[in-house]
Image: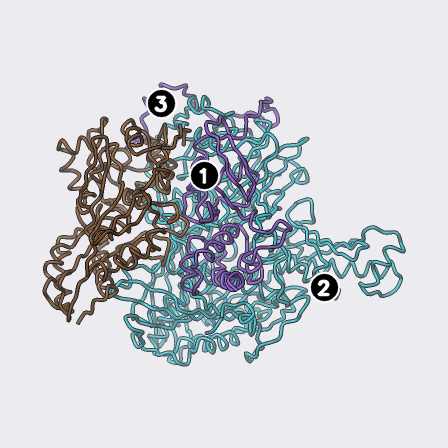
Amino acid sequence: MKNFAYAIAPDISSASEAAVQGAQLVAGGTEILNWMRLGIVSADRVIDITRLPELSSIDRQGDEIRIGALATLNQIEGSDIVRQDAPVLSQACLLAASAQLRNRATIGGNVLQKTRCPYFRAEAATGDRMPWPCNKRVPGSGCSAREGDFSRAALFGATEACVATQPSDPAVALVALDAEVDLVGPSGSRSIPITRFHVTQSEAADLARTREGRRLLGGDAPETPDALIENRLMPGEIIVAYRFSVDTASRNSAYVKLRERESYEYAMASAAVCLDQSAGQVRQARVALGSIAQKPWRLSGAEAALSGQTLDEARLTSVLATAFSDAEPLPHQDYKVKVAQGAVRRALTKAGGSIQ
Amino acid sequence: MSDGIDRRSMLKGSTAALGAAGAAALGSASAQAQDVASPSGTPNVNTSITLNSTSRSFAHEARVTLLDLLREQAGLPGTKKGCNEGACGACTVLLDGERINACMTLAATCDGRSVTTVEGLAAADGTLHPVQRAFIEQDAFQCGYCTSGQVVSAVACINEGHAGSEEEIAEWMSGNICRCASYPQIIAAVQQAATEMEG
Amino acid sequence: MTDMHKIETALTGIIVADDGAPLALPENGIGSPQRRMDGPDKVTGQATYAGEDMPNGTLHAVLVTSPVAKGRIAAVDTGQARAAPGVVRVLTPADMPTLGSPSVPPTAQSKLPMSSLDIDYEGQPIAIVLAETLEQAEAGAGLVRIGIERAKPAVFDTAEVEVPPTEGNGYVLGELDPAHGDVDAGFANAAHRIEATYTTPTRHHNMMEPSATLAEWRGGDLHLNDATQWSWGLQLSLAGIFDMEPSRIHIRCPYTGGGFGAKGYVWPHQILAPIAARIVGRPVKLNLTRTGCYTGCGYQSGTQSRLRLASDAQGHLTAVEHHTENVTSVSDDYIEFANMGTRGMYAMPAYRMTTRVRRANVGTPTAMRAPHEGPGMFALESAMDELAYEIGMDPLELRLANYTDSDPHSGKPFSSNKLREAYAEGARRIGWSDRVHEPRSRRDGDKLLGLGMAGAIMTTFRNASQARVAMTPDGRFTVEVGSQEIGTGTRTIFAQVVAERLGIPSERVTVVLGSTDLPPASATLGSASTISIGSAVATATDNLKTRLDDMAGRETRPDEWPDLLARLGVDRVQAEGAFTLPGDVSFDAHGGQTDYSMHTWGAVFVEMEVDEITGIARMRRAVAAYSAGRILNPVTARSQMIGGIIFGYGRAMLEASPMDPRYGRYLSKNLSGVQLPVNADIPRNIDVCFIEEHDPHASAIGVRGIGELGEVGVAAAITNAIYNATGKRVRDLPVHFEHLIA
């Protein structure tokens, strides 16, 4: 990587301004350093935002929990507030990465991770050193993963251009918690639901043809930018916090992560479940899946179908079958649908659900 | 990407077209004495760290990681480079008491903070840290290359209160890969040291 | 299973008699449970490794490698790189000197690096960037522009099957196509038959220390600080390549951070660093990146084994076929003899085997723990389990029915073999008698449970070695030997050998290793260090004693020696010793020209749990009992075997380096994309024991070898246990979700 200028941001607005001008913001650095090494990004200026005040607290006010964007995954995992009222988020943080990385990785940066697709992650200092096509690396070059061997490829929302998935674990929990993302940018503050924060490739393709999409890409968008859009964070915008309401379902929540290796590994599929079940009947279930789309994949249809019903084996099987009926696994990856369904089943049980 | 590389753009630079491999004799190669540059390249940041309880200042390039600063400039190669991408844990050090991957940390971000490496764990008189002793007694290493990171990680694991059970230790020590695979012995060593440190 | 992992518990019963009775461990000398002599250095960070030295003026080198697997270099533009801050020189093929021809092995590949414009594999070195700092060299490497005319690469799946040449091929370890007896009749007349194809994937060593070298020329001599398993092989290789006297090449190898085979032979970086250092007239440090290790220092070839087994009604094998193929490079014929174990494991009246390669645009494969028997015994021991189910016979009983006490291939008796005792002890420890043969019979909550076992066999390799032992008037002894410490505990056990021979505490012995300025010694490869160097150390020690007795003019005891030396005014007395092989060869395998066939043996038992809802399987317990000759140090030996078992777990459950066939590039060349076992994968109760044994034929000290044996058989034991749990037979490693999910 080339050398860069380095500065510590004194406040959010100066960080935001620097980002608009092309500076790379860094907090934990556990993704960005690798992007620079791999040749995914290149920066002339790096702005350290870890010393911004008041962005790392985890508070509860009334029924709302607020988590500052600079809170590390280990801080969230170990927070009594989170463990008690949103165990799904604590568990998702614990099951991410390693103890060392979780001491650095912030919840703000974590949801901005890029796909673990090995075609995308190829070590190539420059585009002409890429061993294979990848639209996220060299827009318009093509997608090698579609006919290749990427076990974490999307089941939902993929396009011909890209089959990437979002690997964040905490993001899946935040989606199941219906969190809001608080953003500060050049044009002020705004909040959006985390369910709308990330986008699938097909949503990205639609967005790319809108004014919002062109703004998302900043000034120098390439001709075929679909695969570059991964979320709705505008240039210069910084995540400052997540907020969500505590309810019975959030207190009875769980995260299950399935992977070849027992720890220190990204998910093949994961499931976050918030479950309010009383006398065998589901009052409310919120279910989100990780690593099967470029955004945490909410099973809204299944949630509705389970609401007010008993959680019996036959119903669960049919609800899950429906939820995955439009899944589009890559060739030889049909098993991933079952893995994702298995994650939901195990997460429902872990959240205290009893399946009749 | 049939050709992969745009050859037209190549021609703009001072392209050296290559014929048959050259045949310069090994002995007659040109060896010109050069001024040795500073080990840090052209520094554009200054970083002050309390390193193993000693105040140290470094002028370095901003792109230098804490790991490379330790190994190449601070004379502390005990912290190892196994993957340089946060995927093995061989570079584990304590930053303000918390374990981190030094390879994933820009040295500049450590300004004003305290760093403890494996070289800083034993007492000044050379008495080994209980974790170091336990690693020897339980034979918790073989080649030794991951050991610095394992030992530092184990110190933090115990201090964090994550040494309560074998399962907990296994999970919280999984950020340190040992290819010689002394994993059961590492757990035994952490348990032994935890008992001693807490007792 | 209480505290099985605590060392004081684990060492009780680690050495057992033939009947399984635990034996007491001696307090000193051979067999005593001593801690590693280099322990304090390793736990304090004081142990330094090859790439950590930094003589004044050292330049950092970074390789620019080919992003394509096949093609031809059209142009290399170094202009931008040369203009980058700190970059001192960029070397391309045009800068390469004329070189001698390398011997293969120890050189891994016959085609020298950067000697041609043809690209034969992805990752092939194209240029070297030399800069004042590591960051500058890395950045400079990113600025070299390469123009390559691409061609379509051949890969394992598409390459033609070839008979590898045996003439002049240093990778030939035995006959390619051994055959014996009437195989067709053996099948025709059999009561039971099975036939299946098993595959193991290409995978990488992933030793924790990436290969590293530091080259410096001083007064016409080459000094190399190198992370190697074979200092002498490196010296020999470079002497040929640079046309130099070997004695003018000085290899120093302070500590080697693991190797598992990757640091055995000589790879491009070890050739290029000295060339670069010579050209720029400064020391050059070339530490491979982790990514560089995926194409820069070998890998274990994927294998495909087709097995046919036939037996009579009682399970006695009547015919065996084992046909194997592995991938190799354009330039060389590395052969993974996956049928090697099958040649020696069971009584076979008739067999037929073939050994083939497929030539592809890949780097040359190399030995990786455990070569040959590692991938091959997954196939044989899976097939034996399939045969056991076909017959309806207990898998352990089937092994016992086919036990042989002579080598079925050479006909020689085994030098020593306690495999039956190992089977019995392993079975007792895992509780095999409680196993239910019918699959899907045992459950724990959501999980299916299964027990599986496999036999293990490993070739005994031996290397001619020398050693020197010296004594000083302070009563201390020094062992000097040009070996290398890669984690096997060589220092500690050599001290124990001296202590045993002289009846002194091993604390009085210092072991000096890691330099070719010391007596030439075995490679740390092929589980051959202890048998080879340990024997040389024992002989040198005996010679030292004789020397001191001669000086005294009578038989003396070591406690008399300090006075003797003082009286005679002698500062140091030393003696040398050698381990030689019949026929005066430098290396042999399977007993070579002796009258015995030499192998090590083991019995591996595991319990697996499988959740069919999620497709996840995990190991619950592992027990292994070994017949490996005398054990010099049960502490370090146990650690090596546990490490081998976990290496085998990796083979079975996680490890693979898949290649995209369209591009001839590994999908991932990093540890975030390639899964190795982590602590949480591994059950704490891995129970290892050795049957007490003293092999009088293999070495002077009763030893055979252990390092690789621990890996053998584990994968088959795991998949056999998975079959017992689920009824699902996994023949293609590693085990994955798709194999197990309901």
Callouts 3 and 1 close, C-beta under 8 Å: no
The chain displayed brown equals A
Camera-nearest residue between C452 and C391: C452
SS assignment at label 2: loop
Q: Which residue carries the number 1 mark?
A: B110
**Distance from label 3 to label 2 (Cα)?**
68 Å
Camera-nearest residue between C677 and B13: C677
Looking at the image, is mark 3 or mark 1 nearer the viewer? 1
The chain displayed purple equals B
Using the image, tell me which numbered label, if any, was put on residue C445: none
Residue C634's x, y, as percent? Answer: 59, 66
SS assignment at label 1: helix
Q: Which residue carries the number 2 mark?
A: C505
Residue A291's x, y, as percent? Answer: 25, 51
Q: Tell me, yes or no, if residue A269 can be seen here.
A: yes
Q: Which residue carries the number 3 mark?
A: B10
Looking at the image, is mark 3 or mark 2 nearer the viewer? 2
**Distance from label 3 to label 1 (Cα)?**
41 Å
N-term-proximal mark, 3 vs 1: 3
Q: Amino acid at mark 1?
A: Cys
Q: Residues within 10 Å of mark 3 (few under 14, many from 20)?
A: some
